[in-house]
Image (cartoon, coloured by chain):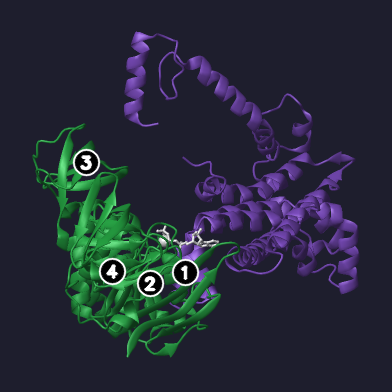
Amino acid sequence: MSLDTEDTAVGARENEPLSVISDTRLVPGQWRVHLGLIGSILLMASPLLLAFVMSTQTVPEVYDITNVGIGSDGVANYVEVFTTYGMASYMFNSLVMSIVVTVAKIAVSLLAAVALVFYDFRFKNAIFFLILFTLMFPVPVRIVPLYEMMAALGWTNTLLALTGPYVASATAVFLLRQHFMSIPDSLVESAKVDGVGPLRFLWDVLIPMSRGMISGLSVITFIYAWNQYLWPLIVVSDQNKQVVQVGMKYLQSVGNAGQTDWGLIMAGAVLTLLPPLLALVAFRGPLLETFGLSE
Amino acid sequence: MTGITTTDLVKRFDDVTAVDGVDLNVREGEFLVLVGPSGCGKSTTLRLLAGLESPTAGAVEIADEDVTTASPSDRDVAMVFQNYALYPHMTARENMTFGLKTATDFSADAVDDRIAEAAGILDIEDLLDRTPSALSGGEQQRVAIGRALVRDPEVFLMDEPLSNLDAKLRVQMRAELAELHAELQTTTLYVTHDQVEAMTLGDRVAVMYDGEIQQIAPPQQLYDAPETRFVAEFIGSPGMNTVEGTLKRRGDAAHVTWGENSLSLPSAGAVKPYAGDRVVLGVRPEDLTQEMGGPLSMEVTVTEPLGDSLLTRGVVGDTEMEVSLPPRSAVDVGDVLSLTADPQRLHLFDIETGAALYHSAETVGSDAAEPPVADTQRSTT
Ligand SMILES: Nc1ncnc2c1ncn2[C@@H]1O[C@H](COP(=O)(O)OP(=O)(O)OP(=O)(O)O)[C@@H](O)[C@H]1O
Ligand SMILES: [Mg+2]
């Protein structure tokens, strides 16, 4: 949407008033469209905005439905979730889990995709379809057998149990495989003739050539891991090893005289939202590229 | 010492035989061009030599060493690909050093020297810090050749390296490649489907058809004395006219007739034996001339002014033929021309096997001293 298209759009409007919906900003006469857009954005963002507003309010203020202004608690709720309720440790645990899952998932998927694309072995396609087949069995479906397995391994309550089930990923293998298949054979052959080994090829050629795809996948994986609730709830029993999504649940049981302290919970929720939001904002470019949405 | 030798090399994919018993002998320091129509197995042959495919049968020797089962990196070959195969995220310099570091054990200084030298030869000094996307096709091709150069391999293998360039650049790069080879004298096997490229670049040219080598000879000999009908029709632009006719002998004289047309052959005693009385007569368009009362009459169907000549296509007897006339000849579609052929430049081929039976020129080719057996024999089956 550059300035010169704006000019032509304005020019066109003089000949054909109001019949063309312009795709540019700042066009006079389009205020209805903009009003509609602003309205729908506000509507979609309202839960977030309300959460933020509530996180600054005291308990009575929250329960006063008409009060939608910034509350009188200020940042007190935020300080409290950190100091009294161990939010920092939940967030740290989540961060460790998400990073481990992200790194391990990408590493395993890269190797699997390399094997599927650049090596010849028997039943290659069958194996690929078997991998795709696992898409039908996400972690929540397998919770009971997985838990039994972790118990048998003695892994419960450890980082291994928390991250292990997330490491293998059909989606990541699939996306990387498709991407690798678009790399010309001659690049691989040129490397072979020059004696470049498979690991060096992966590290020096494939990974740099897939940078966008890998960062996109990383963001998605990070957010996905950060948002896990059910599995950590089941496999981790120590409160100080718990992740932030479950930690939020603990906040709910806090409160005086049967009144849930929504201010506190919303402060926790806003904090929980921040890391994925930052990741999204920082990596929006490669993320759009991953799904072929960038222009 | 030899550059490359293959013995009865065969490569079968599931249902196609891409390479069918190829015996190649590229001498050390030679520039051999492998030429043939699309799908005849040129690339497959090259890839067998590079070790990127493993042969179904046969053996490959490079620099007197049997490398039939050796991995590509152990063969000391460098390959230049049709699509350049440059790594898009690396600069030209990094592209050139990447393989160099693994394939050889030069010190960092030596690497820099080699890059500088290759860049000098190829005139790409200013481009070394650009990535491929910031280079034109010709420049990318230079970098790709540079990447092969710095390796200083035993053998260069090139698979249609110029075919992605526009016509003018191709001619220019062709000259540069020839110069480069004159300077470096590295054994080179060069694959192309363009017979002009083959003729201009090759010390010798191997013509391939349907997985088999038809003939290996110096360019002029290929043109003057094609060993098979296929080579005759493939080499030259346009290729040789071939027409099926009957050979009639009367004493020492003989002539080939088809329809109302007849050409007499000098010294017909030299015709090799063949079965039946039908033969294929070959005569190049440039060896036909217009002559009042000539033995051939052609009804013109198409004229193509090429600037330096007027290429005229027409029907002689029942057969399409082409003739290269002087430019600005007054010829129109529908005219009937009287033609004659240079008696010194007639060829006969066996109608069944396509093998050459006779070339009327007494001394053929410039390299008559060429050892004839080792590298020229290969007939169709
Ligand atoms: N990997 C493969 N699997 C099956 N068939 C193949 C394979 N590679 C090549 N072929 C077949 O082998 C034959 C020779 O192919 P090749 O690539 O060597 O031809 P070419 O002479 O290089 O042609 P072009 O000038 O078009 O590059 C073709 O019929 C092709 O279809
Ligand atoms: Mg080819």
Can you tell which quarter of the image residue B161 is in?
bottom left
- Residue toward you, B161 or B220: B220
Amino acid bearing label 4: Val
Q: Secondary structure at mark 1?
A: helix
Q: Which mark is residue A189?
A: 1
Q: Which mark is residue B298?
A: 3
Image location (x, y in percent) of residue B192: 33, 62
Q: Residue at x 21, y 67 (%)?
A: B252
Can you tell which quarter of the image residue B178 is in?
bottom left
**Marks 4 and 2: in contact by CB < 8 Å?**
no
Query: Closer to the camera: disc 2 or disc 4?
Result: 4
Query: Closer to the camera: disc 3 or disc 1?
Result: 3
Mark 4 burial class by Cα count in 10 Å: few <14, some 14-19, many 20+: some
Q: Quadrant of the N terminus of chain B?
A: bottom left
**Marks 2 and 1: in contact by CB < 8 Å?**
yes
Amino acid bearing label 2: Met
Q: Which residue is mark 2?
A: B79
Residue A90 seen in this snapshot: no
